[in-house]
Amino acid sequence: MARSASLDVQLIACTSFTPPADVDWAADETATDAEALIEFAGRACYETFDKPNPRTRANAAYLHHVLEVGHTALLEHATATLYVRGLSRSASHELVRHRHFSFSQLSQRFVHAGDAEVVVPPLIVEDEELNRLMMRAVDESRFAYNELLDALEERLEGEPNALLRKKQARQAARAVLPNATETRLLVTGNFRAWRHFIGMRATEHADVEIRSLAVACLKLLRENAPVVFSDFEISRLADGSEMATSPYVTDF
Ligand SMILES: Cc1cc2nc3c(=O)[nH]c(=O)nc-3n(C[C@H](O)[C@H](O)[C@H](O)COP(=O)(O)OP(=O)(O)OC[C@H]3O[C@@H](n4cnc5c(N)ncnc54)[C@H](O)[C@@H]3O)c2cc1C
């Protein structure tokens, strides 16, 4: 019987910043490296390292101003890499539409998927009968996958390269795997791209799975750059799932 996977997102890399020693400027101690770098980038544009405007002297005030005026190109200097597991292939297809991210995704051509876990949509998982229906379909497709794999490997017997033989068999057999099959991927993006992704995918209009991914990413990125993501407000929908919106991210 197929097992179900649950979403797991971890922040595994984030910008570190060493200001040039010969520039007379220092960020607030409360600012993270990513936040300090964004301020530095902004001040580099106007040579305002001496912080002449008292209203934006503090790093948090400076970043709030950047968000307010929409000078979000500065956010491109800070990046974060997240490792995502327990995501369905269908949700990952939505994720990879975001062109400013860099991805490294688990290969179904190299890795045997016959016992991969599946991500069951919440509407199905909470209903015993629907869950049984779904798992039966998953088991049937997995059975077909394994049968196809054996038959394909037999047909490709003449191929002396064992790795190539397996790859060719898997890339054909995977056609019957369900959209719900679990995938894993690394996603690297700059903070402008992350904000755009969260703005589009954490709203109530997005599919519940990618929405929960977007909210999970927001929470992790907030730990690393609280001010940069402070404008997103997380709330709950009637079904109990979370969503997030920002008054500054409205580009649909
Ligand atoms: C609720 C919802 C429903 C959706 N339904 C569908 C659907 O039915 N079918 C479907 O195909 N897709 C659908 N999508 C996906 C959507 O169309 C986008 O492809 C996806 O969300 C990526 O966002 P983006 O285009 O803003 O670009 P990203 O790749 O995230 O890029 C960010 C921004 O960069 C700029 N940019 C990037 N590339 C270019 C470019 N080539 N030229 C000019 N500017 C560029 C744009 O300003 C863009 O908004 C849906 C998305 C959502 C959130």
Image: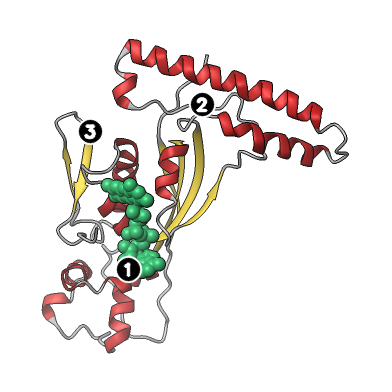
Which quadrant of the rendered structure holds the C terminus?
bottom left
Residue 2 in view (yes/no): no
Nearer to the camera, 156 or 75: 156
Tag in front: 2 or 1: 2
Of helix, strand and loop, which one carries label 3? loop
Nearer to the camera, 185 or 49: 185
Mark 3 residue type: Ser
| Coloration mode | secondary structure
Question: Which residue is label 2 attached to?
Answer: 117
Task: Point out residue 107 in the picture as x, y percentages from the top left corner.
Answer: 61, 42
The CA span between labels 1 and 3 is 29 Å
Quadrant of the picture in which ligand 1 is shown: bottom left
The CA span between labels 2 and 1 is 36 Å
Task: Determine the residue positioned at 21% across, 60% down.
Answer: 249
Question: Which residue is label 3 attached to?
Answer: 241
Task: Point out residue 85 in the picture as x, y percentages from the top left corner.
Answer: 47, 38
Question: Which residue is label 1 attached to?
Answer: 75
Task: Point out residue 176 in the picture as x, y percentages from the top left corner.
Answer: 56, 29
Of helix, strand and loop, which one carries label 1? helix
Task: Point out residue 139 in the picture as x, y percentages from the top left corner.
Answer: 53, 17
Q: Quadrant of residue 173?
A: top right
Q: Quadrant of residue 47?
A: bottom left
Residue 140 marker? none
Badge 3: few (under 14), some or many (20 or more) residues near its Cα, within 10 Å?
some
Nearer to the camera, 230 or 243: 243
Between discs 1 and 3, the one toward the N terminus: 1
Mark 2 residue type: Glu
Label 1 beta carbon less than 8 Å to ligand 1: no
For this view, does 180 lie left or right of residue 107?
A: left
Whether residue 203 is situated above or below residue 126 in the rendered picture: below
For this view, does 127 lie left or right of residue 175?
A: left
Mark 1 residue type: Leu
